[in-house]
Image (spheres, helix red, strand yellow):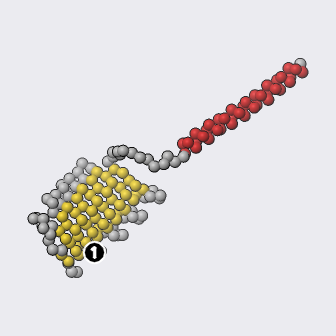
């Protein structure tokens, strides 16, 4: 009977060791899986990304750049940390294309554009939206004199 009791104690001790080993192995597997799942992937590289729009956000989640397209126009907008438009680039279905720069209040201050017929112009605006300087091409594509408007 003593022999039977000592064998049972040995089996129980072996059972405890196996249980601890299984729990430890399961913890290692779960921990390893979490480490792999949470580690940063790094920079993503793609040959082509196809989408109708995208947004770039800063660390606070505020949109700082966005681009979109529709059946007619395509454009890109850059904003400051307060969400105000600071720069805009657009191409339109009617053939126009342009880039505009805006001040901290969101007012257009400089615009460069081309028309569908090939004419091009550039204009600088004051803080009240009045044109102060403009340069443009005329129909025969020779330069027009730069205009300076007085207040």
57 left or right of 20?
Answer: left
10 left or right of 63?
Answer: right
Q: Nearer the viewer, residue 72 or 116?
A: 116
The tally of labels here is 1
Q: Write down the residue under mark 1.
A: 126
Horizontal and vertical percent for residue 70? 27, 50
17 left or right of 97?
Answer: right
* Residue at the left extreme of this rendering: 140
SS label for mark 1: loop
- Hey, which quadrant is residue 92 in on the image? bottom left
Picture residue at 64% right of the left edge, 38% below the top: 28
Picture residue at 58% right of the left edge, 42% below the top: 34
Picture residue at 86% right of the left edge, 24% below the top: 6
The quadrant the N terminus occupies is top right
* Residue at the bottom extreme of this rendering: 151
Task: Tell me the crowding category of disc 1: few under 14, some 14 to 19, or many 20 or more residues within 10 angstroms, Cα based.
Answer: some
Horizontal and vertical percent for residue 45? 41, 46
Picture residue at 65% right of the left edge, 38% below the top: 27
The quadrant the C terminus occupies is bottom left
Q: Nearer the viewer, residue 130 or 76?
A: 76
- Hey, which quadrant is residue 36 in on the image? top right
Horizontal and vertical percent for residue 75? 29, 56
* Residue at the top extreme of this rendering: 1
114 w.r.t. 151: above or below: above
């Amino acid at each position: 009977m003593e022999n039977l009791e000592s064998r049972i104690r040995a089996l129980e001790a072996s059972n405890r060791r196996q249980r601890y080993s299984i729990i430890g192995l399961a913890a290692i597997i779960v921990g390893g899986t979490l480490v792999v799942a949470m580690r940063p992937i790094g920079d993503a590289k793609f040959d082509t990304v196809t989408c109708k729009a995208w947004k770039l956000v800063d660390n606070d989640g505020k949109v700082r750049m966005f681009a979109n397209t529709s059946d007619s126009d395509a454009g890109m907008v850059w904003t400051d940390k307060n969400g105000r438009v600071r720069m805009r680039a657009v191409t339109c279905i009617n053939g126009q294309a342009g880039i505009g720069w805006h001040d901290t209040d969101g007012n257009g201050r400089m615009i460069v554009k081309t028309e569908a017929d090939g004419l091009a112009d550039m204009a600088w605006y004051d803080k009240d939206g009045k044109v102060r300087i403009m340069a443009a091409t005329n129909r025969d594509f020779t330069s027009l004199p730069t205009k300076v408007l007085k207040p």
